[in-house]
Image (cartoon, rainbow, N blue to C red):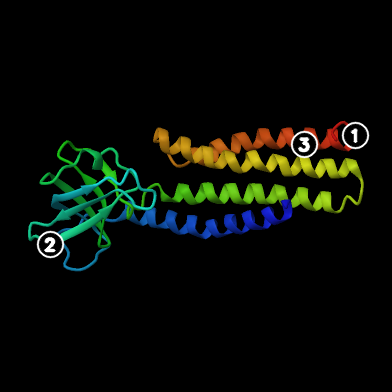
Amino acid sequence: MWLLGAVLMLAVGAAMVPEFLAAQQREREFRAAPVCAAVPVRVSDCRWEQRFTVRGVALNRASRSKSPEVELTLPSGKPWHVTFRNTNPVLSGLEPKDKVVGLIWRGDVVELRDTAGERQETTDGPLDRPTDRLAGALAGLSFGSAALVGGLWSAFARGNRRHDAAGRMVCLHGIPLGVTAILALWLQSANDWPARSVPIIWGTVAALTLANMVGFVVAALRGKVK
């Protein structure tokens, strides 16, 4: 089971790496994008602001399959549908006929600003998404590597209880390595910390976990852990 879990988590972690790099590149491109000199007639790499009127709001708090969403209308009357990852700080306070300003980049509304100046990123927004992929890569690769090493160690122990126990200690310590990556992402998101806090938190806890793992492995090889 450990080896199967290792293969699955390594595959997930490896798949997250190119997604993280692509999301990071997209964020860099967005931050470097200039302000449009005039409203573009085609999808453009520059950023521009458009005024909208709120037509309808659906928070969808009781649904796990539907994202919070808002229906906007342009001054011309053309509708524009926008979805969000959560309801705060802007969406939850919107009502029909409210005036908002949308930041548009590459043909998508990536951010909405209300009359109070509060801003909220939409699901098309390029910010913060790299951290999701980074946390997934850290979780998958760290747990998968530990489970693979520990699983193979136990598999080749061939009845040697000490080596089997040492392999199990490596596997078990892979769990907090993976969980810490997810907790780091949650802390970063909940406290609005910079993206670099995710690898910093994970790296700190991972170093302590690895040191603890070494201690248990040594104890297992000495016959002190069964």
* 223 shown above or below 18: above
> Is 17 on the left-hand or right-hand side of 74?
right
Per the rendering, the mark at residue 78 is: 2
Specify the amino acid type for callout 2.
Lys
- Extreme residue in the right direction: 159
* 88 shown above or below 28: above
Q: Dot 1 lies on which element? A: loop
Q: Give the CA distance from mark 1 to mark 3.
A: 14 Å
- Extreme residue in the front direction: 62
> Is 67 on the left-hand or right-hand side of 179?
left
Q: Which residue is mark 3?
A: 214
Q: Dot 2 lies on which element? A: loop
> Is 154 on the left-hand or right-hand side of 83?
right
Q: Quadrant of the C terminus?
A: top right
Decide: few, some or many residues near mark 2? Use Cα within 10 Å; few <14, some 14-19, many ≥20: few
Tell me, yes or no, if residue 70 can be seen here.
yes
- Residue drawn at the location 90% of the way across and 34% of the way down: 223
Specify the amino acid type for callout 1.
Gly
Q: Which residue is mark 1?
A: 223
Specify the amino acid type for callout 3.
Val
Q: Do callouts 3 and 2 mark residues in contact (Cβ within 8 Å)?
A: no
Nearer the N terminus, badge 3 or badge 2? 2
Q: Give the CA distance from mark 3 to mark 2.
A: 63 Å
